[in-house]
Amino acid sequence: MTFIVGPLFSGKRRVAMELLGCGEEALARRAVWDVQELAAARSDLEALAAELAAHEVVIATEVGGGVVPADPAQRMAREAAGRLNCLLAERADRVIRVFCGLPTVLKGAL
């Protein structure tokens, strides 16, 4: 599994399509994205990470930057998203961070 992470609107899906050599339709069949939103609703992040790792590509938006939310539920959701990212990176064969459209390989090779 390839795990791609980065800020909102940084080009993560474009990088995934280039990596897989496919278009948007094929990407929808081969990848899953916005997984950070799933973390808040699940109590067992290990099980969620295992489910997601079955996909060829998993894409997450970084949510840890900026001001810490005052709302406890938002803080917990942000914490869960960060923990899920760690679990996915651990399971991944390749981890790529995309920033300003530029992919940086953190684990594995392009």
Image (cartoon, helix red, strand yellow):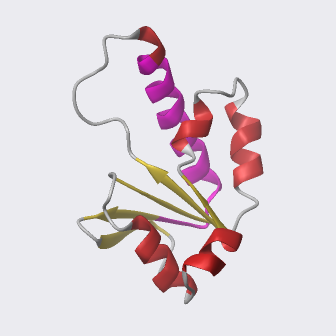
Q: Residue 41 in the image: x percent, y percent?
A: 65, 27
14 to 85, vertically: above or below: below
Compared with residue 60, is residue 105 higher up or lower down, i.e. above or below? below
Q: Residue at 44% of width from left, 28% of height from top?
A: 78
Q: Quadrant of residue 26?
A: bottom right
Say left or right for 20 vs 67: right
In magenta, the rendered stretch is: 74-95
Q: Residue at x 34, y 69 (%)?
A: 104
Which residue shows up at 71% across the image and 63% down it? 55
Asked whether 54 or 25 is in front, the reply is: 25
Q: Nearer the viewer, residue 16 or 82?
A: 16
Residue 22 x %, y % = 57, 87
**Quarter of the figure with residue 53:** bottom right
Rendered location of residue 97, percent (x, y):
38, 62
Which residue is most to the front? 25
Instruction: Check residue 77 for magenta coloring.
Output: yes
**Quarter of the figure that contains the N terminus:** bottom right
**Residue 86 pos. (x, y %):** 53, 43
Drawn side of residue 61 relative to residue 20, left or right: left
**Residue at horizontal 47%, vertical 36%?**
82
Q: Main secondary structure of the magenta part?
A: helix
